[in-house]
Image: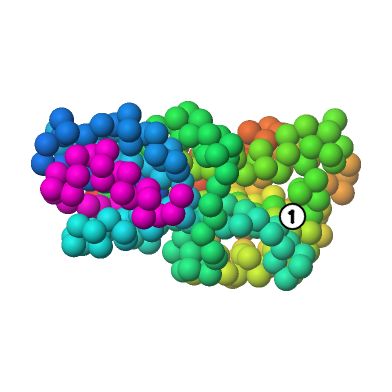
Amino acid sequence: METTTYSQALLEAVGGVSNIRSLAMCMTRLRLELHDISRANLAAVRAIHHVLSVRRRGDSGVEVVFGPAIVNNVADDLSFRLDMPIARKNAKAVVKLTPTGPRRGRSRMTGYVGRRRASEHAPTVLSRDDLERLKELLNSVDLPDDEEGLSDGELGDSAILVLNGPNMNLLGVREPGIYGKDTYDDLVELCHRTAIAEGFGEVRCYQSNHEGDLVDAIQEARLSFDGIVLNPAAYTHTSVALLDALKAVGLPTVEVHMSAVMEREGFRQTSYVRDACIALVAGEGLEGYAHAIRILADYLRDAQPSSRK
């Protein structure tokens, strides 16, 4: 299907052009205010390919969650068809999915990317199997509702970077007796799920086996992210460069390790990055990343004044 097919199907399912009063979007969500909600067929909306979930908003609204990189195109097409502007709440938090692949031939990136980098990557169209997994993921958490909680300046406008060092791409293969059987893809999914549940507007996961790439990622995070979850892996015990980069950018950072490093070999007791971190999470396996994201979320909430009334 092309974008025009999605938007045409959506128009028909909500009662046609004449039934739409306003059009807005926030993150991956498209929000329609209707003149007559009884004309909307939510089951038909839910059946549209690339629609992940649907729910009512108030007395006359419908909120539709689309797959990554789809919502922007659908909103633009609807805006053209309706001759109606799009209200973009928290515009900086609009997200797209970055294709997984090498960076300069050496590193692996995957995750939701928005803000300044979104335009650098071509949209990714997911397979039906991938969409079903995303639907299960979204249905397992409560998406933040702006009417009930998030407002400008809170976590819905915040972005975090989850940064992993050498050999983390081999999770599931690498010493499963220590690191478990979960894969790097499982790690990424857990981070996305936790970040959504905590109300973040964006999370990006990045892994490299090369120290310089990790330093570059930390430096670049200064302009695009509000905090970092960092597992330097073996560089924990050797890299002054990572410590200096963290101190230079000044972003709140949580150090995380899957194993209980304090109970392992003597050389693993040393962490060069710890002096630049607000907390350490170790020995919790994959769940340590969820713990670290929650710590970062609490820190960022405390660091900025609430605009709730």
Q: Disc 1 residue type?
A: Gly
Quarter residue 15 falls in: top left
x and y, in percent, of residue 272 in the image: 74, 57
Q: Which of 51 and 246 is in front in this view?
A: 51
User: Which residue sits at x=38%, y=58%?
Assistant: 73
Q: Which span of residues is magenta-colored?
A: 1-25
Inspect the magenta stretch and tell me whether residue 250 lies in it: no
Quarter residue 183 falls in: top right
x and y, in percent, of residue 27 in the image: 38, 51
Is residue 86 visible to the viewer in this orientation of the structure? no
Say if 210 sits above or below 154 in the image: below
Inspect the magenta stretch and tell me whether residue 23 lies in it: yes
x and y, in percent, of residue 12 in the image: 26, 42
Say if 59 sits above or below 102 in the image: above
Residue 294 is left or right of residue 103, and the answer is left
Coloration mode? rainbow
Q: What is the total number of numbered labels drawn onto the structure image?
A: 1
User: Which residue sits at x=41%, y=45%?
Assistant: 66
Dot 1: within a 10 Å radius of its alpha carbon, few (fewer than 14), some, or many (20 or more) residues? Answer: many
Q: Nearer the viewer, residue 243 or 42?
A: 42
Q: Is mark 1 on a helix, strand or loop?
A: loop
Residue picked out by circle 1: 165
Residue 254 is left or right of residue 14, and the answer is right
x and y, in percent, of residue 209 in the image: 79, 59
